[in-house]
């Protein structure tokens, strides 16, 4: 059960970016699992990828394609990660890209491939190649919502969002994105993928800067269980069918980056809301840090604490666990007497120990909510960070301890 | 249910170290919860403490007492951690130490206090002081096993071990130690405590070196859930009733440090075996690292992965999760083609991808065992590290999500 998450019903099309969606029979029969995003000539593409050293073959291929420039096709399959299969993975992904190139009349280097699903099994190449042949047929044309559904593995709801901004000259720019969850809903399924497009015209350098900024404030700020997949990717295309945007028009550019960041945050939060077995959506807000890096590291220390996460599941205002996590966190010379902890607006710890006015009923009332914020002030400086996470439930264990089958 | 752990029945007394055990009614009625270890004059005491910034008041007091030297009494209560209660904690712990000093006719600075239990509640001072008065009575005299039982919080079995060595001159040296678990068996209970004594005569400098070496190879190598308590401590006393040992007699000293390390490892492993909800005892052995620190950090990355831990619970040879954890681990420039993974003696990953001879049935046979080793060779150097951990089960969540009551 996802936390306050419903399927998006208002995703805006993006001019110059067209999805095709088919069933390649990689996942259980009857569920679309292969999608292609076709981008107009002149589109610019940026992406950020997993830092896992065991990056899967498609990740390496997509990274090369994006770095080379001139990407025209994003090919995404769900149900099989094409990871941990040695050099066969590279051979297979190359063959898929060549087939897409043949069907659409582009160069195979213009195809960026993405995969999510089981690790350690070969792609079902025969079914995949035959499905690629069907992608160009009219009935394969699909919406952003169709694509959002097809990239799901064991996500419980499709994830997508749109934004529009109006430039100083009154022109409209549209951004739409979709994502799939980072949770391992079944063993071996462990990937966060997000794809977004805008009709704006943006230079490669500016788009690279924009995706890095947006990613830093969104997908880099979430954690379900602290594990990083071999296949994670966030990819953004600018099709140049709408207004031209760039850092030289500062106000429009700021609006654009803010819209992109907000879009990415909504997708990132949707991934947490649909985290494995999640029953709570928890915001960790660290203030008073001496650096953003310190604030973020402290937020993740708390977010990854199984003891904090199980207390959240129980709705138990067990502030001793939060305090203990802060105390073992990544700050060498923490002055504990300056630390305060709030649950939403309830002061729990002030001056390093239990606030004299704290009543357990007040803490319990906050932690009974499906969404709340744990605020920690380190009392060391002016820097802050925000991280979103979920709780640790029986269902998380059930999902992840289920045998693959 | 602990993994292959039974109560010790052969703990050897240590000359010059005598336990007293009483029921102070801190824990549920009828269970001893206050113990005192009385050390002969001339004893030398060393200790290592939690690095949690929110160290509890007794930890700060015990650290000062040990640093000052001349500790004669270790006072330990279970059921209340005396943590997170502000300056009141220091006042209360001071009063306890003064009362012990009065009863036994020592200076209060010679009493080192230790607490484990609920965080954020004041010590029940009236009951505690009255119980201290009873410690010196004959019927309070207890064995190491009595003490091991009394320091338990929600441990399921008492933990203790003994070692004896024979010096080059044919003299016998005895070491005995007890410990309580690091698991949070109920919310707020989160402390590992270990106490050991030897009848050897050891200088302060040598004993400090010995406890650091033993701790580094034992309690520093375990993790149940990655959380560090506010009250952790490992304390070692040398009563000087037996032979004198020191670095100047190299062979005897080596035997002694090895025996101490082995003793501490048995206690540390017992804590993991009795970890919250543990159903498996897993050894992580990292070889081929470029440094011990790198090997250990990689071991903890795998040990803390909820996805690996749930796969262990399920007995599912989900090697993709181990591989993904290695890939996101703390090695910047890992050459994945050099990485191999074994489950006991079954080669799973060689040369960075699935071993061609691997059969899932072989991996499943290992992971069905209650104890096994996950071996990862990073192929970068000659250094190694070993870490012990447990799995992540429904029971872990149940234990930690239970309301405090």
Image (tube, coloured by chain):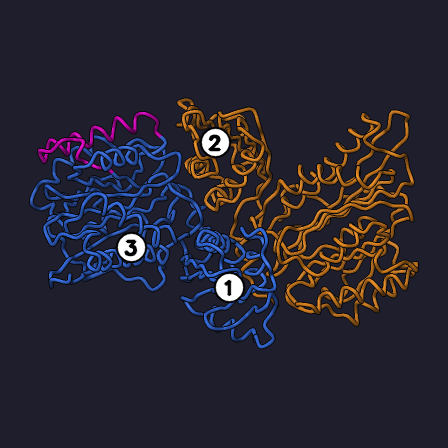
Chain colours: A orange, B blue
**Can residue A140 be seen in the rendering of this structure?**
yes
User: Is disc 3 on the same chain as disc 1?
Assistant: yes
Instruction: Using the image, determine if residue A35 lies above or below residue B100.
Output: below
Task: Tell me the element at label 3.
Answer: helix
Closer to the N terminus: mark 1 or mark 3? Answer: 3
Q: Which residue is under mark 1?
A: B377
Residue drawn at 21 percent across, 59 percent down: B162
Mark 2 or 1: the one toward you: 1
Q: Which residue is under mark 2?
A: A363
Quarter holding the C terminus of chain B?
top left
B95 in the magenta segment: yes
Q: Chain of mark 2?
A: A
Q: What whole-number distance in Å separates the C-alpha atoms at marks 1 and 3?
A: 26 Å
Callout 3: 10 Å neighbours few (<14), some, many (20+)? many
Q: Which residue is under mark 3?
A: B264
Labelled disc at residue B259: none
**Can residue A156 be seen in the rendering of this structure?**
no
User: Is disc 2 on the same chain as disc 3?
Assistant: no
Q: What whole-number distance in Å separates the C-alpha atoms at marks 2 and 1?
A: 47 Å
Q: Pick whichever, B275 or B134, lies toward us.
A: B275
Mark 3 or 2: the one toward you: 3
User: Is disc 1 on the same chain as disc 2?
Assistant: no
Q: Pick whichever, B173 or B170, lies toward us.
A: B170
CB under 8 Å between callouts 2 and 1? no
Q: Position of residue A180 (x, y in %)?
A: 70, 50
Task: Tell me the element at label 2.
Answer: helix
What's drawn in magenta, residue-wise?
A: B85-113
């Amino acid at each position: 059960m996802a936390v306050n998450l419903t399927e998006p019903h208002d995703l805006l099309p993006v001019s110059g970016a067209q999805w095709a969606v088919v069933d390649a029979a990689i996942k259980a029969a009857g569920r679309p699992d292969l999608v292609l995003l076709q981008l107009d000539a002149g589109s610019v593409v940026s992406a950020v990828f997993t830092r896992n050293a065991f990056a899967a073959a498609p990740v390496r291929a997509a990274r090369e394609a994006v770095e080379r420039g001139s990407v025209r096709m994003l090919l995404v399959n769900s149900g099989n990660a094409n990871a941990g299969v040695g050099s066969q993975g590279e051979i297979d992904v190359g063959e898929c890209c060549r087939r897409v190139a043949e069907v659409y009349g582009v160069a195979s280097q213009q195809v960026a491939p993405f995969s999510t699903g089981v690790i350690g099994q070969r792609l079902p190449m025969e079914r995949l190649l035959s499905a690629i042949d069907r992608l160009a047929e009219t009935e394969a044309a699909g919406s952003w919502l169709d694509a959002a559904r097809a990239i799901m593995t064991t996500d419980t709801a499709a994830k997508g969002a749109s934004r529009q901004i109006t430039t100083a000259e009154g022109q409209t720019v549209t951004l739409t994105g979709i994502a799939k969850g980072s949770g391992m809903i079944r063993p071996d399924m462990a990937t966060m993928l997000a794809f977004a497009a805008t009709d704006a015209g943006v230079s490669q350098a500016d788009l690279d800067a924009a995706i890095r900024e947006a990613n830093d404030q969104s997908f880099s700020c979430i954690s379900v269980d602290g594990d990083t997949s071999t296949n994670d990717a966030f990819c953004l295309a600018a099709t140049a069918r709408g207004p031209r945007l760039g850092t030289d028009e500062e106000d429009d550019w700021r609006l654009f980056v803010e819209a992109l960041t907000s879009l990415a945050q909504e997708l990132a939060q949707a991934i947490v809301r649909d985290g494995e077995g999640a029953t709570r959506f928890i915001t960790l807000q660290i203030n008073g840090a001496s650096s953003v890096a310190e604030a973020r590291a402290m937020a993740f220390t708390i977010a990854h604490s199984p003891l904090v996460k199980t207390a959240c599941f129980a709705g138990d205002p067990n502030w001793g666990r939060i305090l203990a996590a802060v105390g073992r966190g990544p700050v060498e010379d923490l002055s504990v007497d300056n630390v305060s902890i709030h649950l939403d607006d309830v002061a729990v710890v002030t001056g390093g120990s239990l606030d004299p006015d704290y009543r357990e009923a007040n803490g319990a009332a906050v932690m009974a909510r499906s969404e709340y914020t744990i605020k920690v002030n380190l009392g060391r400086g002016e820097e802050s960070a925000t991280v979103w996470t979920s709780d640790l439930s029986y269902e998380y264990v059930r999902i992840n301890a289920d045998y693959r089958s």
